[in-house]
Amino acid sequence: MLSDTPVYPISVAARLLNISVHTVRMYEREGLIVPFKKKTGHRLYSELDIERLNCIRRAINQSKISIAGIKTIYTMIPCWQINKCSEQARKNCIVYNSNVQNQPCWTIKNKDERGECRKCKVYNNFADCQIIKAAIINITKGNS
DNA sequence: GTTCTGACA
DNA sequence: TGTCAGTA
């Protein structure tokens, strides 16, 4: 399993991904990733974060999916299912109802507190491209 | 020296 | 996407 312990500073993360530091920050601003932040404000990335970024890169370069498109896919993750929310809870949930704005749940919840969404299954279970693909196939089957 | 935010070519 | 400023 890939470690979710934040260890790499942004310069190392960028080097591992062959992209600029600036671009790494942009993906965060767009809500695609939630890096750990030290009290100094400095970002740290885990192996899982790197894998997530790799997935994002592949989607952009190979699949020609836009950042907005990736956001949409993340937004469709059934968080209520993963968190086993009751129908009542779902109905009143600001996160559940945020999907209309094309905002992944982790950009809504705990906006000011880093570290919470980073640990959430909804965020962590979808770092791997294969898993995202499998999930989409399942959803498609269910609807056909 | 490295990273941060914000701004601009 | 790159780069520069002014900080911490």
Image (spheres, coloured by chain):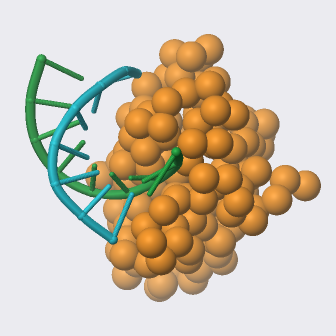
Chain colours: A orange, B green, C cyan
Q: Is residue A44 visible?
A: yes
Residue A28 vertical placement versus A26 (above, below)? below
- Left or right of residue A84, residue A61 in this image: left
Q: Nearer the viewer, residue A12 or A133?
A: A12
Q: Residue at x 44, y 34 (%)?
A: A23
Residue A120 screen position, x and y as percent: 64, 71
Question: Which quarter of the image is occupied by the N terminus of chain A?
Answer: bottom right
Q: Residue at x 56, y 16 (%)?
A: A61
Query: How many numbered discs, if any?
Result: 0
Residue A141 vertical placement versus A64 (above, below)? below
Q: Nearer the viewer, residue A121 or C3?
A: C3
Residue A124 screen position, x and y as percent: 68, 60
Q: Is residue A81 visible?
A: no
Name which quarter of the figure residue A142 lies in: top right
Residue A110 vertical placement versus A135 (above, below)? below
Question: Which quarter of the image is occupied by the C terminus of chain A?
Answer: top right
- Left or right of residue A36, residue C2 in this image: left
Residue A32 screen position, x and y as percent: 49, 47
- Left or right of residue A3, residue A26 in this image: left
Residue A35 vertical placement versus A82 (above, below)? above
Q: Residue at x 55, y 76 (%)?
A: A116
